[in-house]
Structures are given as structure tokens and as C-alpha cells.
Amino acid sequence: MFAWSTLVYPEIFVYVLSIYFIYNFIYEKEPPFVFRFITTLPFLPLIFLAHTSYTLTSYDLTNCDRSAFEGPLIQYLYAVELLFVIAIVGLAINGYRKSNIEDKPRIFYVTLGVLAFLLSFSFGNIIGSTSLDWTIGQYGLFGAPVFVGLLTYVIVKYKAFDIRVFGAQVLIVILAFLALSQYFFAQNWYGLVLTSVTVVFVAVIGYILTRSIIRTRNRSHELEHMTAKLGEANDKLRQLDNAKSEFISIASHQLRTPLTAIKGFVSLLLEGSYGKADATLQDVLNKIYVSNERLIRLVQDMLNVSRLESGRMEFKIVPTRIDEMLRDVYNSFLIIAKNKNLKFELALPTKELPQVMADEEKLREVVSNLLDNAMKYTNEGEILLRAEVASFGRVVRITVADTGIGIPDDELPYLFNKFSRGKDINRLHASGTGLGLYVGKQMMEAMGGRIYAESKGVGQGSEFFLELVTSE
Ligand code: ADP
């Protein structure tokens, strides 16, 4: 009779576990202490009354089913069960309201399953104990498959549980039961020892296994979380980068106009349009002109970079004759070369060069940039601008050679990177952005050509080559 009356414990326990389950499912964490404490309280009266006639009023030794669970404690049980059901519904509604749209159906189906199970279970028990016909009562357990069915649906459809953890735990529990069941079959003491060893073994392995699975799962959750954050950060960076390009573009536009005006006036002054300037003034004007030219190129480079990066740079690539342009560029640098006392030569073949596929204005900028560098990085000696046909007539190669500071081997591969400047360059030549060659490379590639550099080493001069395909 004592044993039979203990049946009232699991009855409440089922409800307690159900509410824990719902709590865990909705809030994805263990219920807090207060919650656990309150849900444990209903067990208290059971301890004192479960095994008295308040619970089981009579007991049929030959047929347990006939025993009468009719005491007042049974009514208490039903009341507690009802309270639990209400609490579960409350929790679920609250969770449902606060959850986001993807979680709503999961919460709905799982709660429905739990309720189907609990209600049919209670209902079966109520019928069983009031009619004392437990054959009808046992149908109440059919709520359980409904619950399992809905749970499976939610797992498959909405990936509600991490099936790896879930599956591993189920497997371990089954293994544990199998191992424990061996106790029934153990016939002697070493059978018992063997079983005990197996049980301990399964427990330890099970523990390690679940822990490692949970750890991997947490890590992959973290990873997902971090990936999402990184994505956001990346978007923000991109926006910032765009804003920066936009700013540079506007700023350089604004800078270009006054610089061009300065260039015009200085040229006029040098030509003597405002009266003849004496030698000292000429010298100063030359210096202004040269610095101004450099500023113009710098602004142009920044503008080019922002255009290249926002994809707004347009190329008009057509078959082009470049002899004239080269002469032009050469002439515009004569003044700078003279200022620095450098020998400056132009070497074009006697026969006109074949047409090449290029955008003349862009090519002019690239050549100017190379010459500007050559002048900047050469303190004495000579600079040569040469053009020739190469690769059996397939390309035209333009060379800018100087006798300047040269380029160390380890810097050669990085010259054409954005913002890349030589290690000692800042000290030697403060002006410069490290953009010229980068822009040059981008432009040459867009025109289907290439750009490369050679140098025998520090102090040995440098050579820069541009190659363009001929269109004939
Ligand atoms: P900037 O000249 O503004 O620094 P560039 O992109 O034009 O930027 O050049 C990148 C780097 O390549 C320079 O800082 C310099 O170290 C090196 N370089 C370019 N041209 C020459 C040259 N003619 N002689 C030696 N070094 C050069």
C-alpha cells in the first residue's frame, strides 16, 4: 500500500518537468531559483499525506487497479495540476508575445503538444479515479504520442532543438538504461562488478560526449554571432569608405580650380606678359610653377583614386597616336628638369609609332606621373623618356629611365600598391602620397596594357615601363 501510494509523486513531477521544459524552451535558460522553489512547494503536502488514508482510502491486494485513490489529497493534486496548466499557458503566451516572428510557430506547437499531453493525462487520471475504471483512464496516455509528434514536427520543420545535442543525449540515456538493465541478469558477483564497470564507463563517456558536443555547439553559435557582427561592421566600414571617397572627390574638385588659375598666371608671368622679370624673380616663379604642378598632380591623383574606387572613372579607349602627346609631356617637364639641373632627353623613333589602344588623357597622366617621380627622386644625372615598338610590333613600350636614388629589391613588388611609399622616402622627399603608381597601374590595366619597374638597386637609378597593345 505504501509503494502504491507513491504514485502521487510522479503525477506532480510530470507537471513540474513540463513547466521547466516550457520555460527552458522559451527563454533558452534554466529557470531561476525562485521559480524552482515555488514549483517544488506542491510536493510538500505529499510528504506528509501521500501515505495516509487522505490519499489511498482502500487497497486491493489482488488487484492494485481497484485500490481507491479517493482521499482529499487527490482533489489537491487535481487543483495543483490545474494551476500548473494555467501557469504553462501564461508562460507560453508571454513568451509568444515577446518572441520574434520565426520563434512564434515553434512556441505555439511545442506548447500545444505539452498541453495535449498534460490534459489528456489528467483527464485520464480523473476518469480513472472517479469511475475507478482504469481501462478508460489509460487512454489518457495517448496525449504523449501527440506531444512527441508535435515535437518532432517542430524539430524537423523549425530546427527547434539542436538535434545533435538532443540525439546524443537520447542515445546516452538509452545506453545507460541498457547498462543498468544488466543488473537484472547478473548472476554472480563478477557479473555485478562487470555491470558496475559498464555503468560507470557509460556515465563517464556520456558526460564527456555531451559536454564536448555542447561546447562545439556553443562555439558555432558564437561564430555565427561574430560573423553577423563582422558583417555589420563591414557594412559600416564600407559606408565610411564611401563617405571618405566622396569627401576626397569634392575636396579635390574644389582645389583644382584655384591651382589651375595659379598655373596660368605663373606661366604668363614667366613669359613676360606682365613685364620682364629679372633672373631672381624668374627663379622664384619657376619654383612656384614646379610646386604648383606637383600640387595639381597630387590633387589629380586623389581624384583619380576616388573615381577608380567608386567605379566612376570612364575610359575612352580608342586607337590612338601618341607621338604628339609624348612630345607635349616632354615639353611640360623641361622647366622642372632645368630647375633641378638634370639632363632630360626624349627618344622617339624616326618613323611615327603605330596606333595603340589607349585613352590619351589617362596615358598622359600616367607618363606625367612617371616623369614627376623621376624628377623628384633624381638629384643629378639624366632622365630619359623613350618610346619604341617591341614584341615584334605587338606593343609600344614607353620607358622613363633616371639615374636617381634607385629602388631596393624588397620594395619593388610593393611600388604599385595604394599608399605605398619607399621606406626612406618620407625622410628624403616629404611631398608625395604613394598614390601615383597605384593610379598608374589601375589605368594601364584598364587600357589593356601593363606597367612595371626595374632598378639595379639603391643609388643605381630606376626604369619604369609602360606597354600598350598596338591596334594595327
Ligand atoms: P609618391 O611618389 O607620391 O610617394 P608613387 O606611387 O608615385 O608615390 O611612388 C611610390 C613609391 O615608389 C615612391 O614613394 C618611391 O619610393 C618609389 N618610386 C617611384 N618612382 C621612383 C623613382 N623614379 N626612383 C626611385 N623610387 C621611386
Image (cartoon, rainbow, N blue to C red):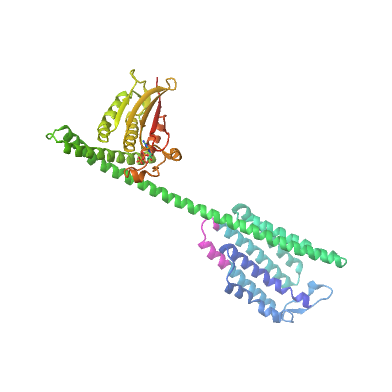
Residue 36 or residue 394, whichever sits in front: 394
Q: Is residue 144 rendered magenta in the image? A: no
The quarter of the picture where the N terminus appears is bottom right
Query: Quarter-wise, where is residue 180 in the image?
Result: bottom right
Left or right: 269 with respect to 246? left
Q: Residue furthest left?
A: 275
Residue 65 or residue 368, whichever sits in front: 368
Q: Is residue 470 visible?
A: no
Residue 259, x across and y down, in percent = 24, 40
Left or right: 295 with respect to 69? left
Left or right: 450 with respect to 199? left
Q: Is residue 101 rendered magenta in the image? A: yes
Q: Residue furthest right?
A: 188
In the displayed structure, 59 sits above or below 353; it is below
The quarter of the picture where the C terminus appears is top left
Residue drawn at x 64%, y 57% as measured from the top left: 213
Residue 249 or residue 111, whichever sits in front: 249
Q: Which residues are magenta?
A: 89-103
Residue 359, x across and y down, in percent = 35, 29
Q: Residue furthest top?
A: 351
Q: Is residue 358 visible?
A: yes
Query: Quarter-wise, where is residue 470 in the image?
Result: top left
Query: Quarter-wise, where is residue 311 in the image?
Result: top left
Residue 198, x across and y down, in percent = 78, 62
In the displayed structure, 90 sits above or below 431; it is below
Residue drawn at x 56%, y 64% as measured from the top left: 27
Residue 239, x across and y down, in percent = 39, 48
Quadrant assignment for ligand 1 = top left
